[in-house]
Amino acid sequence: MDSNISEFDSQEQAPNEALPFLHASKLTHKTLFVSSKFIWPKGDLVEAYGKLSEPYVDLEGFLKGDKKATLEASKLVRKACLEHGFFQVTNHGVDQNLLATALHEMGPIFNLPFNVKTRASQSHPAKMWGFSTAHSNRFSSKLPWKETFSFGFDHCNSFNNEPSVVDFFSSTLGKEFKEIGVIYEKYCEAMRDLSLALTELLGISLGLERSHFRMFFEDGSSIMRLNSYPICEQGGVALGTGPHCDPTALTILHQDQVGGLEVFANNLWHSVPPSPNALVVNIGDLLMAQCNGEYKSCVHRAVVNKHKERRSLAFFLCPRKDKVVRPPEKLISDDESRKYPDFSWSELLEFTQKHYRADAATLQNFTKWVVSSRPWGL
Ligand SMILES: C=C1C[C@]23C[C@H]1CC[C@H]2[C@]1(C)CCC[C@@](C)(C(=O)O)[C@H]1[C@@H]3C(=O)O
Ligand SMILES: O=C(O)CCC(=O)C(=O)O
Ligand SMILES: [Fe+2]
């Protein structure tokens, strides 16, 4: 992993030469060549060894309040989180039509004309919302082979000064996108409800009050990201999203049936074939810090596809920005065993947006960065 704090600080904004290239490949559906900016180090390109045998957690009984089913589900979640931080959930209660519609409506969004996308692009590297093409305005190498559209979702109706999803769509994409904005607002509401329910399972699995994490997140403001991965005929050198842990707490990913998500476990990459009735869940850095490293933040990536465009929707659960991340006493044997400093979500988020490109070692490097800047240390 060659990204480091100074690289991000020192580089000037990358010229947008990637933009025409990506659009050229999309327009002609033929990849002319892969610009060197999209080529990843060989260490990041090691092929997957096989399929991941992650647990499929059936949530039906848990969501109905069945005590035995809840215990069973929490045991499966615990096993997955101790191993690699990744599992899938079935009977999750999210409306299948809403899931299908949210995936389908990504078409009109990503097929918008170039000038509309440019107007709705992330206006400044530190601004997270809107379109981004290969993050070419933020990075100058190892560009991800993807277009993204990101927006915020306030769990409690603009408590965190986030505009509503509907207002964001209308103001950013145009009034004709109001109805699509309603769909994504409903989608985010469903993801909020499911992710908060999952925090209860996580609390139970750690021997905490089931409300412990729910209370920490319920008045938060989460990140919603639509990912479009264009066809890349020259596979083997580019990556849709490079190896990383999500800096956030917990991610619920809904993917189409193309495939490309991979998880790093037992020192090997494993593919995660899409499962039509399941949603992917992975633990992020924030939750790993909240349990003092007991659960693993999932290392994952998205590989490119030579024949088909791939789409996914990622809901990243986040608390309020001023919330301080500190493990409960029950999970800390003594002060010496603290692996991470107390920090606010806004500190970690700002670190990933202004100083360090999130990768598979974000939390470790954030810890070094924080401890070096605080005279009292950890
Ligand atoms: C807090 C965040 C930063 C990223 C979006 C959310 C959660 C996932 C992060 C990300 C996807 C991890 C891989 C690198 C990244 C730069 C990307 O490829 O998009 C990350 C996101 C970001 O910084 O925009
Ligand atoms: O699209 C995928 O399969 C993974 C995307 C991802 O990991 C992310 O956006 O953080
Ligand atoms: Fe991710």
Image (spheres, helix red, strand yellow):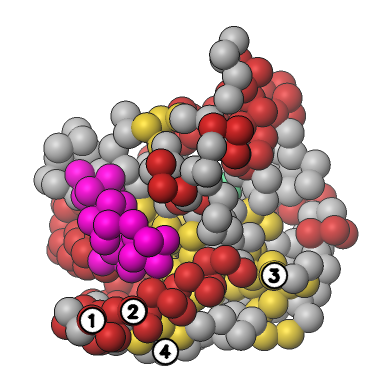
Please, is residue 217 above or below residue 33 in the view?
A: above
**Residue that mark 2 sits on:** 71
| Mark 1 and mark 2: Cα distance apart in space | 6 Å
Secondary structure under tag 3 reads strand
Q: Is residue 20 magenta?
A: no
- The amino acid at mark 3 is Ala
Using the numbered discs, state the Cα–Cα distance from disc 1 to disc 3 in whole angstroms: 31 Å
**Left/right of residue 129 with respect to residue 81 in the rendered view:** left
Q: Does the magenta run of residues contain 214? A: yes
Asked whether the residues under the numbered discs 1 and 2 touch, taking CB atoms below 8 Å apart as contact, a structural biologist would say yes
User: Which kind of residue does numbered mark 1 sit on?
Assistant: Lys
Residue 50 on image: x %, y %: 73, 85
Residue designated by label 1 = 67
* Earlier sequence position, callout 2 versus callout 3: 2
Q: Position of residue 326 (x, y in %)?
A: 42, 37
Q: From this viewpoint, which residue is outermost toward the right?
A: 42
Q: Quadrant of residue 160?
A: top left
